[in-house]
Image: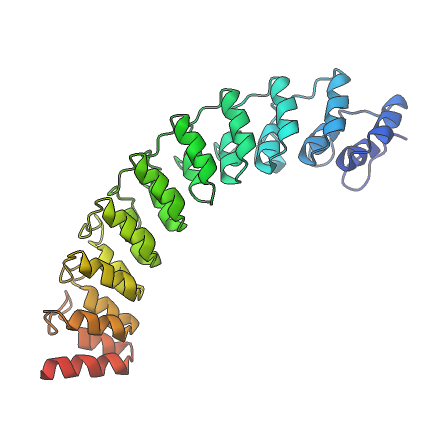
Amino acid sequence: MTNKIDAKGNTPLHVASMSGHLAILKLLVRNGGNVQMLNKEELSPFFYACENNKISVVYYLFNLEKDFKINEKYMKRENKSVLHIACQKGFIEIVKILLEHRATVDITDEEKLTPLHLACSNGQFKTAELLLKAGAKVNKLDKLGKTPVYYACTGDYKDIVELLIKRKADINKSTLNGSTPLHAACEHEIIDIVSILLKNGAKVDVQDREVGTPLHLACRKGNEHIVKLLIDNRASINLKTKNDKMRPFHEACKNGHCNVVDILLENGVNYEKENEQGWTGLFFSCANGNNDIVKIILSRKTDVNRIDQDRTTALHIACMNSHEDVVNTLIKKRLM
């Protein structure tokens, strides 16, 4: 009776473990309940106690001196272990218990993520600290080549970033795609972390395989504060990407970020540089219809009749995209 299963294969012990009813769990065990039975997802009462932060239940189950296969990877949970689950959720007491019972601190799931990766990506500072004290490798790579500090830089977790740096995290380690923690911080527009990384020697002109440098990303996002910070730290404002020769100025114009355009111009950007297609910032501004940026560029010495690889002018582009105000601005400039 105590081992009767429901439609999901759960026994009364599974249910008691999920809800943390220790007295009921003890009663079931005394009456023949099997604490090692698995449900249809091949999950045990022990797993559910860990997943739901039922500390007293976990202690009790360990005291039964059963073999709970503490490092087992659960297929229905992306091959995560109970330590992965507890670290992801920040269940610090469960983590302590598991480590005391010799859980493997750097165990990996199907994405090669360690418990430290998950603690960092979910902002679990105390958990990350505990894992590091237990010997977790600070520069372990997942399947995509991302380190724990890379994940910490994708969220507003500057305390974790600082902790990892103190533990010798490699802040310039590139992913398989060439992206660095500085790219991640710029992508997510977290200026405090950008500042921390730069102060600790982050390389500012590393290119990934998609967007380019961190400055390319900041210009695409339109975050003028990060743009200024990167330029103040000697980011190359005219650097082109390897695949399509896009420059930070192109990204700012393409995405209509007027303030960023102003910052780049104030810092001496070469606004006449072309991408692989032969487009300058003026072409991108005409394509998206940002007349303010068009006017800013035309207020400087520029060739309004420049042609791209297809012998198309900025006026062609504005007409193709039905931007009447931009067409009017270009015509007035050509008549001057």
What is the basis of the colouring in this image? rainbow
Could you tell me residue 200's position as x and y percent?
A: 32, 34
Depth check: give the residue in front, 156 or 46. 156
Depth check: give the residue in front, 125 or 117. 125
Could you tell me residue 60's position as x and y percent?
A: 77, 22
The answer to whether residue 90 is seen in the rendering is yes
Depth check: give the residue in front, 146 or 97. 97
Could you tell me residue 313's position as x and y percent?
A: 15, 73
Q: How many marks?
A: 0
Q: Is residue 204 left or right of residue 159?
A: left
Q: Quadrant of residue 138?
A: top left
Q: Quadrant of residue 46?
A: top right
- Residue lying farthest to the top in this orientation: 65
Q: Is residue 98 left or right of residue 37?
A: left
At horizontal 86% and vertical 33% (from top left) the residue drawn is 4
**Quarter that holds the C terminus:** bottom left
The answer to whether residue 212 is seen in the rendering is no
Q: Decide: is 278 above or below 182.
A: below
Q: Is residue 333 left or right of residue 41?
A: left
At horizontal 29% and vertical 45% (from top left) the residue drawn is 209
Could you tell me residue 273's position as x and y percent?
A: 14, 59
Q: Is residue 107 left or right of residue 221?
A: right
**Quarter that holds the N terminus:** top right
